[in-house]
Image (cartoon, helix red, strand yellow):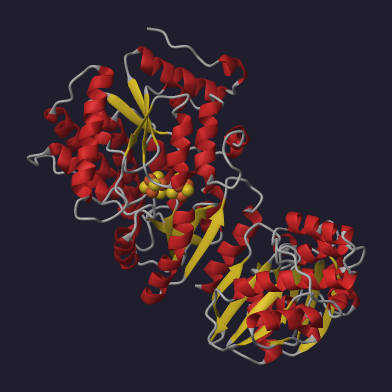
Amino acid sequence: MYAIGIDIGSSCAKTAVTGGNGTVLWLDQMPTGWSSLEAAEEIRRRLLAAGYDPEEAPCVATGYGRVVVPYAKKAVTEITCHAKGAQKLFGLSDLDVIDIGGQDTKVICVRGGSVRDFLMNDKCSAGTGRFLEVMANTLGMDSPSLIELSGRGGNTSISSMCTVFAESEVISLIGKGERKENIAYAVVRSIAKKIASQASRLNADGARTVLTGGLCEADELRRALGEELGKDIESCKEARYAGAIGAALLAEKL
Amino acid sequence: MSFELPGQFAQFGEARKNGFLRVKKIKEDGGKVAGTFCTFTPQEILDAAGISPVSLCGMSEETIPAAEAHLPKNMCPLIKSSYGFAVSNKCPYTYFSDIIVGETTCDGKKKMYELLGRMKDVYLLHLPQGDREHALEQWTEEVRRFRGFLEDRFGEAISDEAIRKAARLRNQERACRRRLLELQKSDPPASTGYAIYKALEGAGFYFDVNEVCKELTRLADSLEADYAAGKRPAAPGAKRILVTGCPIGGVLEKTVKAIEEAGGVVVCFENCTGIKAMLDDVDADAPDIVAAVAEKYLKIGCAVMTPDKRRMDLLRKLVPEYKVDGVVEIDLQACTAYAVESYTVRGLMEELDVPYMAIETDYSASDSGQLATRLEAFLEML
Ligand code: SF4
Ligand code: SF4
């Protein structure tokens, strides 16, 4: 028997199938597109093509599109799912999870296998994937290239956390002829600072910290975050699927 | 006597028109209306002067743009909304009020009252800021001064006897409100928190306190009878939530409603409109009735006080009393007093070993999805 977890985020939809005993059998991702409902249908097709029937197997949906997955037996928030998935991926029951999502960033504090506390940004987009995207756009590139480029920059900073003001700061830096890699550095530092300040509000008792979500492989961001927080941030390439894997693990218990 | 309706009356929707006509009628029948903004307002003094206090706290974002013509953007939505209703003549109570009564609570409100004073008759009571030995004496003097002001302003003496009578009636009202709130102590609770809050809020717009008591009693009776008959309005196993923080009338749907839609139930409201101002009564037979009134109000805990020991003491008492599973603090954006104090509340909850979450929000709908996720995740965590 297998179980299915679906994580429909604002920009990317992830699917995980686990083998009933927690082993991951299949992982998949695709852009969410403009409609979560259509994304859910597309996921159904892909699952069927891979030999998994979401009507047959227990299925849990998470992410901001969690309520529009018609074949899911249950909707669970991404906080609970990321916590679950990250524990599995890193084999830890005490850890802090930082998930940088498209619209929101969460810091989840897991102790003894359950969520003890979490923080999520308020309505502004500072410190989220959206912030990076806007800045990358202004620089004429995409978020992963901006983060990569930042590794070669330094010595510049932007002071505003607010996306709108930060964007004008970036534009004025461009106007002043600042080098692109330095601007990229400033952007990545700014987001790392914002997230670190969020994360430090939760009790730091020396537990390990992991990065999940779509930017899990952005090494420069991970490094910047680690420097701001004063500790190593771990990740792995499956960490983008943490929410979906967590959902599948919860589905196994349905 | 005739009272003019605002110039743009014709453009108002049906409900608003009715509101205006209702208050106009009250005025034509000789009634007087005092607009208030805070649970610290000594209602008994107004009652005794024959003036009906009614809350002017703005609860909709509709009038915020109008307010922002004078007020800064980065300000508590309650203050902006209230002020906006006044400048745009959209609230019948503000419009027809004979007097507006404010207190020196938070900085935002204090300074807003100054601007409001340019278009309305505003009286400001100076509220002590904390627990100095002379705080009660000072506040009693303020309430006495207020009484004198009303006597001069409306040309009629306010007798001690009238204040005592008002105190007895308000004590009754407080007892009715307490009874409704305390119904939630049962496990499972007797009602949704949303329904209780709506009833308590609505009761503030009746002018006849006897009527308020009757309505609240009727509701409590029927909830009790339903409960005895086996009705359980909250989802089975719903987590019991205590709500604390700023006034929440303007954000009820995306907070309290969202908690209850996600499978929780609000069993206790510590904040304004909730229990904090209802716990203490006025000693109507005290030798100095004005001092007795003042004393009752000074017992209210609020983040505008420093230190705010009363709020912490009350929270400490309420958590076990209502068998609370989790505490949600709802703060309004740019409310410094509550935002800072939330750190203290978090510490208290850690000590009591009760999960705690603070959210900050305003009157717009833009964060309702995100809030729902956060509240849902909080409930999953419990
Ligand atoms: S929160 Fe405090 S200052 Fe504001 S209305 Fe309530 S009691 Fe008054
Ligand atoms: S919510 Fe805070 S800022 Fe707003 S009026 Fe009340 S005390 Fe003042």
Extreme residue in the front direction: A176
Percent from the top left, x then y, of residue B293?
20, 41
| Residue B44 image offset from top left, x and y in percent | 23, 34
In this orientation, which residue lies closer to the viewer: A137 or A27? A137
Residue at 31% across, 39% down: B41
Q: Quadrant of residue B88?
A: top right
Vertical side of B178 occupied by A185: above or below: below
Q: Quadrant of residue A204?
A: bottom right
**Side (left or right) of B123 relative to A45:** left
Point out the image quarter for the C terminus of chain A.
bottom right
Answer left or right for A26 relative to B245: right
State whether residue B375 is above or below residue B305.
below
| Residue at 85% over, 74% down | A29
Number of numbered discs visible in the structure rendering: 0
* Identity of the residue drawn at 51% across and 48% down: B252
Q: Is residue A108 above or below residue B366?
A: below
Residue B344 seen: yes
Q: Quadrant of the N terminus of chain A?
A: bottom right
> How far across and down, in percent of the image, does residue B62 sit?
60, 35
Give the camera-side residue of B138 and B63.
B138
Q: Quick one: B292 or B18, which is closer to the camera?
A: B292
The answer to which of A65 and A139 lies nearer the viewer is A139
**x, y percentage for residue B167?**
19, 37
Please name the residue shown 21% across and 27% down the image: B148
Question: Is residue B21 found left or right of B160 in the rendered image?
Answer: right
Return the residue found at the far bottom. A91
Q: Quadrant of residue B84?
A: top right
- Can I make out residue B281 in this image? no
Q: Residue furthest left?
A: B287
